[in-house]
Image (tube, helix red, strand yellow):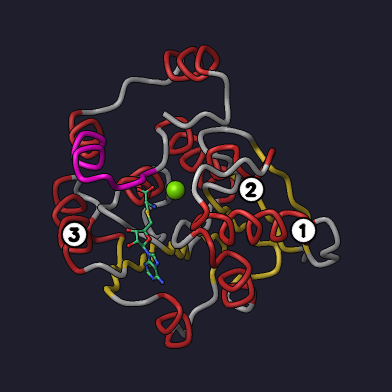
Amino acid sequence: MKDVLDNNLQFFLKSLLPERDKLLIEIEKYAQEHHISIVEPEVGQLLNLLVNIVKPKKILEIGTAVGYSTIWMARGIESDARITTIELLPKRFEKALENFKKAAVIDKIQGINGDAKDVVFQLADIYDFIFLDAAKGQYPEFLNLTHRLLKPGGLLVADNVLLNGWVVDLKYPERRKKTMVYRMRNFLEDLKNQDDFVSSIIPLGDGVVLIWKKG
Ligand code: SAH
Ligand code: MG
């Protein structure tokens, strides 16, 4: 449980979500047991809503983990839309492919096992929707890398931007997290002055930022 939001409020919001199917619940358990930080279900629901509204044909996800957020999005896209998703760790990547098969969404998804910092240079497409959910210390870098891959009028969504609330009061519990926390804070502050984008921070789950590229 992330503590950006008050616990009572979090439980309340969770209680109002539509019921999840067996597969999503199974993946939530797996992620918890293996200490994999997947989106909260209410953020999954938000992603599903956003792809329903935006109707992107080409989606890019950076940080697949075991495919939980990918499945939330895959269930909301049109039948001719496709998701490209990149994951660094082979074991997680394999598990994600397994989950895509179970969810019967494998035909909509191109999985790439590799470092997104390299892989993005090999992508020939541009995207209407990008979900950024990889290494949290590297968001500014990833934003620069993905900027040219986002179509004008496209939406970029980034997860975990409030970093357990550390970004808010800078009371990070561990010294080694300091750099990550300051980088994220700078990333959010820089968004104020970006003329090419309109953005909004939603304090749901661990904090989600929506960044719309003008056009
Ligand atoms: N989006 C997933 C969770 C992703 S967790 C969900 O909500 O279900 C973040 C993932 O990003 C981890 O699995 C990590 O291995 C991966 N990652 C970190 N740095 C990366 C990089 N440079 N390239 C690709 N994947 C990366
Ligand atoms: Mg996340």
Secondary element type, mark 1: helix
Mark 1 or mark 2, which has the lower sequence index? 1
Q: Classify residue 19 by image quadrant.
A: top left
Mark 2 or mark 3, which has the lower sequence index? 3
Pointer 2 residue: 209
* Residue name at image x 19 percent, y 69 percent: 90
Classed neighbour count for the residue bearing mark 1: other residues with Cα under 10 Å, few (<14), some (14–19), many (≥20): some
Secondary element type, mark 2: strand
Q: Looking at the picture, does residue 92 appear above or below residue 31?
A: below
Mark 3 or mark 1, which has the lower sequence index? 3
Quarter containing the C terminus? bottom right
Q: Looking at the picture, does residue 26 appear above or below residue 112?
A: above
Does 76 sit left or right of 203 as displayed?
left
**Structural distance between the alpha carbons of marks 3 and 1:** 34 Å
> Which numbered marker is on residue 97?
3
* Residue name at image x 42 percent, y 43 percent: 76
Q: Look at label 3 and name its amino acid.
A: Leu
* Residue name at image x 36 percent, y 44 percent: 38
Pointer 1 residue: 191
Classed neighbour count for the residue bearing mark 3: other residues with Cα under 10 Å, few (<14), some (14–19), many (≥20): some
Secondary element type, mark 3: helix
Percent across and percent down for residue 138 are 54, 67
The segment highlighted magenta reads: 28-38
3 vs 1, front mark: 1
Percent across and percent down for residue 100 are 21, 53
Q: Nearer the viewer, residue 201 or 137?
A: 137
Does 206 sit left or right of 69 as displayed?
right
